[in-house]
Image: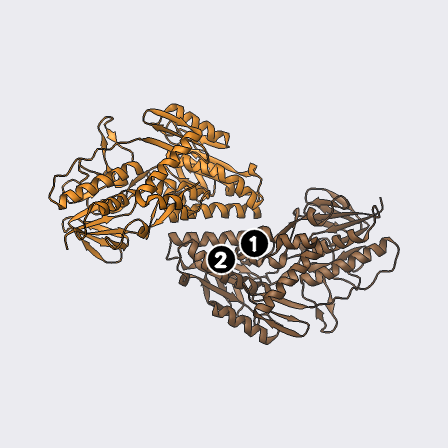
Chain colours: A brown, B orange
Amino acid sequence: MGTKIVILGAGYGGVMTSVKLQKILNYNEAEVTVVNQHDYHYLTTWLHLPAAGTIHHDNCRIDIESIIDTNQFNFVKGTVESIQPDNKQVSLADGRVLDYDYLVVGLGSEPETFGISGLKEHAFTISNINSVRLIKEHIDYMFAKFTQEPDRADYLTFIVGGAGFTGMEFVGELCDRIPALCKEFDVDPAHVQIYNVEAAPTALPGFDPDLIDYAVELLSSKGVTFKINTPIKECTPDGVVLADGEEIKAKTVVWTGGVRGNSVIEKSGFEVIRGRVKVDEYLRAPGYDDVFVIGDGSLVIDETQNRPFPPTAQIAMQQGEALAENLAKSIRGGQITKFQPDLKGTVASLGKGEGIGIVGNKKVFGSTAAMLKEVIDHRYLYKIGGIGLVMKKSKF
Amino acid sequence: MGTKIVILGAGYGGVMTSVKLQKILNYNEAEVTVVNQHDYHYLTTWLHLPAAGTIHHDNCRIDIESIIDTNQFNFVKGTVESIQPDNKQVSLADGRVLDYDYLVVGLGSEPETFGISGLKEHAFTISNINSVRLIKEHIDYMFAKFTQEPDRADYLTFIVGGAGFTGMEFVGELCDRIPALCKEFDVDPAHVQIYNVEAAPTALPGFDPDLIDYAVELLSSKGVTFKINTPIKECTPDGVVLADGEEIKAKTVVWTGGVRGNSVIEKSGFEVIRGRVKVDEYLRAPGYDDVFVIGDGSLVIDETQNRPFPPTAQIAMQQGEALAENLAKSIRGGQITKFQPDLKGTVASLGKGEGIGIVGNKKVFGSTAAMLKEVIDHRYLYKIGGIGLVMKKSKF
């Protein structure tokens, strides 16, 4: 066989690398192995929907086999334990060891709790299919418990920590879901309280002020209480304690306040900043010409602003596509090219038919933003699975 | 206005009394008030189905307004606090007081825990819409939690205390639901454990041995572990401790081991045996010619066996119908007649298409029993709501 390429993770970055590489490579030109914890790929940017229960989690996942041709590439279902870059090896949790000539690390992110006490133990996170299915079932369960103990306001108090994109998108969905939940469980909607708590001096830090105002006003009008400029001091089994001393009793705390790179990267000895590898212009880990890091585990500096690009699906996908071309060039002995992100903008959904976004330099609101979000989602599905996948997974 | 009749509870007994009474009474012949905790009637004998999640709880409840004409009878949504039979008054939890000339007490049952420690605090019961909705959501939640902590076998261990009719019917449904739950949550069915624990020397004590064998073998073949002749010593947040010292770790314990009469009856000073009033042959509480007790709160002796009839929907319905006729006779100054149950038999479901039963002297098994159970259910719906209700609520 030819060159061994191992791709760790089938998230946005790993899947785009794989799909593109399958298009470029000829038969037997390389032996490619894709490793993923599950036998499905999930749409991380949709996870706030099944978390709130507005769509089923199956709508957010796609069998690996339906997007990657497993006759052409090997697929290994397994959890990565560590990478030994000096030996060019990867160890899996079940003891298997994989050799590589080129390694693609697309292992995604983990929640960043900034050392806030109790958050790791008591807060839910919007991280993967299992974690959002748990949030959905937990919320349903709290409604069922409330009908038995109607003096327990904490059962129907929902705290979302972090008013970034994920936090606000989730809050938007939750507002949409509450009427159905109240009907299902015979609960008066007046009993439900939703808090969105953010440490920064504004919601959506760094985003356009007009769009921030729009989002905050919209969600406030749906009943959300914002606590901005209010760090969480502690999370307990009973709720949260804020930095200003206020305690909010709630049986549901969802933490969306930040992510860091997968801990496997740091454990494997790579130099990291908040779990992320500051890759070179070819997406390589410092010191290793054969290890590429993409997606949430990579850190790419935006030279125009002199700060890292935020970790998004968009940049992960662009990295995956660029990397696939460079991998093909490498095994063919060609010259590899520099990665240059070409970010089109950012759109966030805020419940059904609502959203905000920046496309180019243009601000978009409301139904326009919601529609754009759908277009972006469909474009991705088309890229990885063609029109068939778009039809199958469409939220419409 | 004429005679004041107050009917407490809209269960099988209360509803049958009300429906029959509406048919017999002429306009303004009596002022009838029906008091119920909810604005719906629920089908107690179906509750094991939504508890397991095989049907939606809404299929087991019917708006009071759709079975009782609230132009003819008053409907009061409220919780009965106590009865003052010497003052001919009923006090509700919200402070309202109702006067009566004749009182019908059809307040149903409460779980009987026989003093087993921790059962009241930690076990679920199949008692009403809220309690079974909680069981269903709890089970779903346990599956969701297991996907996050796959070493927690207790999340997928289900203990049903009591192998009487309700216990075995619930276990049968649960077996039917497990495959769907495993699919929904990506769980290997091999992780699921179901125990049915019974203190008596046999499952379904007092029932026909052939039918008991059939039921136990059927459910065993579906994976249920029976622990017969094994009292539960204690229920804890972590599971149960059996009398023989064995501890089974389980986050779900459903207690179906027995019922007693509603505690309001005892609190109101009536003489009770396990919460039930031993009524006379006219269904009257001892010492009160104007207080009738029906359903699970009443105790009627089966003279042929010299022991109480078990509390069933069937006897409650017959009591309700007989009582309606006697109430009409009473207010018209006629002679009331003795209540004589005419029990047709007993049929229990054991999951979809399966069941056991005795009809007359005939034993029925399998699909015949399951079909008979449906016929019985439909007959009841027809009695209280006509063919429209049968069509609406049919489980087919």
Type of amino acid at the residue the image marks with label 2: Thr
Which label belongs to residue A132? 1
Dot 1: element: helix
Q: Position of residue A370 (x, y in %)?
A: 59, 65
10 Å neighbourhood of mark 1: few (<14), some, or many (≥20)? many
Quick one: quadrant of the N terminus of chain B? bottom left
Quarter holding residue B277: top left
Quarter holding residue B109: top left
Same subunit, labels 1 and 2: the answer reads: yes
Quarter holding residue B169: top left
Say above or below: A21 vs A248: above
- Can you see residue B18? yes
Look at 71% across and 73% down and name the residue there.
Answer: A305
The chain containing the residue under callout 2 comes to A
Q: Contact (CB < 8 A) between labels 1 and 2?
A: no
Q: Nearer the viewer, residue B211 or A93?
A: B211
Callout in the foreground (1, 2): 1
Q: CA distance from mark 1 to mark 2?
A: 13 Å
10 Å neighbourhood of mark 2: few (<14), some, or many (≥20)? many
Say above or below: A176 vs B286: below
Q: Residue furthest right?
A: A333
The chain containing the residue under callout 1 comes to A
Look at 33% across and 44% down and name the residue there.
Answer: B386
Q: Circle 2 sits on which residue?
A: A252
Type of amino acid at the residue the image marks with label 1: Val
State left or right for residue B227 relative to residue A336. Answer: left
State left or right for residue B38 relative to residue A376. Answer: left
Say above or below: B285 vs A46: above
Mark 1 or 2, nearer chain start: 1
Q: Nearer the viewer, residue A386 or A30?
A: A386
